[in-house]
Amino acid sequence: SMMADAPTPAPRPGLGIDIGSSKLVAATIALGGESAVVTQGSLPVIVRNNLSNDATPLAVTFGVGFNRELGEAAIDTPASNAHNLVSGFVPRLGAQGSDGACKIPAAEEGGDDKEIRLEQVLAMLLVGQVQNLYTQIGAAPSQLVLAVPPGAQPSATAAV
């Protein structure tokens, strides 16, 4: 008996993320001439964040146990946790030592704070955008294309 060919899965879109100095915007992008990329007419689809906004603030807050809030949720952090807000960090990406790092609260009450690289903070926001794309269209990107601000320092561009 002849077996039917398995259906060909639809190509997954690429994801372009424009990293600004204070916000990022993500959209689907066509890769290698694939015509089945998710678009509205001939335009890319803007990937909306968890609050349905086009742009996501480059901000993360940390709480005890490495709990974190991203984007608007970080900006809306209560004043009592404002000291754990990380924002305005894009110019410091790739910097050496403590200039390129931030402190986050200990995993448990009374423990020592931990230092993490700002590139890790950016990675958290980028993963959030990939998750938003999956929520919006039901597919993970096949590739990621990142853009940095035109005036970014070479160390920041290399870090991204």
Image (cartoon, rainbow, N blue to C red):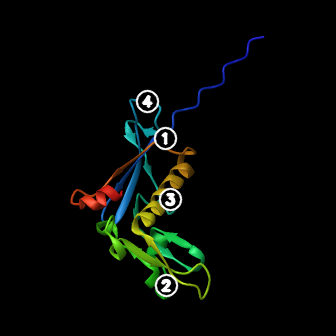
Please tell me which of labels 2 and 1 falls first in the chain: 2
| Residue placed under numbered mark 3 in the picture | 128
| Residue placed under numbered mark 2 in the picture | 81
> Disc count in the image?
4
Q: Mark 4: which amino acid?
A: Ser
Please tell me which of labels 1 and 3 falls first in the chain: 3
Which mark, by number, is residue 118? none
| Residue placed under numbered mark 4 in the picture | 35
Tell me whether circle 2 and circle 4 mark residues in contact (CB < 8 Å). no
| Residue placed under numbered mark 1 in the picture | 142
Give me the C-alpha separation between circle 4 and circle 3.
Answer: 26 Å
Q: Is residue 99 above or below residue 110?
A: above
List x then y, in percent, for residue 29.
40, 41
List x then y, in percent, for residue 57.
40, 67
The quarter of the displayed image where residue 71 is located: bottom left
Please tell me which of labels 4 and 3 falls first in the chain: 4
Give me the C-alpha separation between circle 1 and circle 3.
Answer: 16 Å
Residue nearest the viewer, comparing 52 with 96: 96
Q: Mark 2: which amino acid?
A: Asn
Tell me whether circle 4 and circle 3 mark residues in contact (CB < 8 Å). no
Q: Is residue 124 above or below residue 63?
A: above
Q: Mark 3: which amino acid?
A: Gly
List x then y, in percent, for residue 142.
49, 40
Please tell me which of labels 4 and 1 falls first in the chain: 4
The quarter of the displayed image where residue 111 is located: bottom right
List x then y, in percent, for residue 118.
40, 68
Q: Quadrant of the C terminus?
A: bottom left
Tell me whether circle 1 and circle 3 mark residues in contact (CB < 8 Å). no
Task: Tell me: 83 left or right of 151.
Answer: right
Give me the residue at 30% from left, 65% from top.
Answer: 21
- Dot 2 surroundings within 10 Å: few (below 14), some, or many (20 or more)? few
